[in-house]
Image (cartoon, helix red, strand yellow):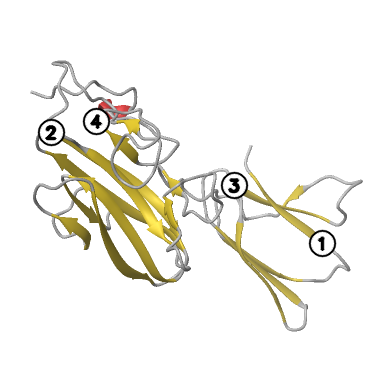
Amino acid sequence: ANEALTGPAAGGAYELSGTINFNQDGPTSGIVGEGGFRPDEAFPGIPGTTGHADFFTTETFAWLELPAGYVRLGVNSDDGFRVTLHEGPDPAAPLLGVFEGGRGAADTVFTFVAPAAGLYPFRLVHYDGNQGSSLEWFAILGGADGRKRLLNDRTHPEAPRAWRALLAASPLAFSQVVLEGEGARISLKWTAAAGVRLQRRSALSGNAWNDVPGTNGQGDYAEDTAVAAAFYRLFQP
């Protein structure tokens, strides 16, 4: 039976806005606690309905905002963990970091390459046996002291940000605007969606926007620039 206290989000999950810095006895402060960051927080849902905090597991999903190039992340855990690169559980997901077995709070650091700056999906699974339990998820940013920062630590602007989900791109945005032939022709592209219309007017103010014929629900448009100036927008009622 799942003895953890049910969270308010879908599927009984917890939506967190801070960092991953947990201790089964949290919140704690000062020298009390485990790992390298203070103060700790309690694991969400622990202790559960039976009031004990042993033999449990947690699962964390996050989109991490990473720079291009080498990235060093670390997990301080008691006991084991694994970090994979995927939005959800997938046995074929790339394994980035792991510790298998029982231990007191200790670091495992792993390095990988982000091919481009952007958002990447991560899954962190942690489990506890008995006695103490803690979990921290951090980045190592370099420098003489290593500059360890908890992921999503908003007190440090340099700490990598974490996001819960990606939203679909708005259809009301041009994906391409090209002037061809030294400005003699304009080509526009956007994400086609029902009801999205291309509109045009000759000045930013003082006259009405007019639909460009034949563009309702389309995703591209091109015309010769016969007028001195024209302004375009995407409109969805």
For marks 1 and 3, the one nearer the N-term is 3
Q: Residue at x 22, y 46 (%)?
A: 105
Where residue 115 sits, quadrant-wise, is bottom left
Front of the two marks 2 and 1: 2
Dot 2: element: loop
Where residue 188 sits, quadrant-wise, is bottom right
**How far apart are the alpha carbons under marks 3 and 2?**
59 Å
Label 4 close to label 1 by CB (< 8 Å): no
* Residue under label 3: 196
Of the numbered discs in the image, which one, if any, rests on residue 131? 2
Q: Amino acid at mark 1?
A: Ala
Front of the two marks 2 and 4: 2
* Residue under label 1: 230
Structural crowding at the residue carrying mark 2, measured as other residues with C-alpha within 10 Å and reported as few (<14), some (14–19) or many (≥20)? few
* Residue under label 4: 24
Residue furthest to the bottom: 181
Dot 4: element: loop
Front of the two marks 3 and 4: 4
Q: Is residue 164 left or right of residue 207?
A: left
**How far apart are the alpha carbons under marks 2 and 4?**
9 Å
Where is residue 137? Give x, y as percent. Answer: 33, 49
Q: Report the front residue among 31 and 224.
A: 31
Front of the two marks 4 and 1: 4
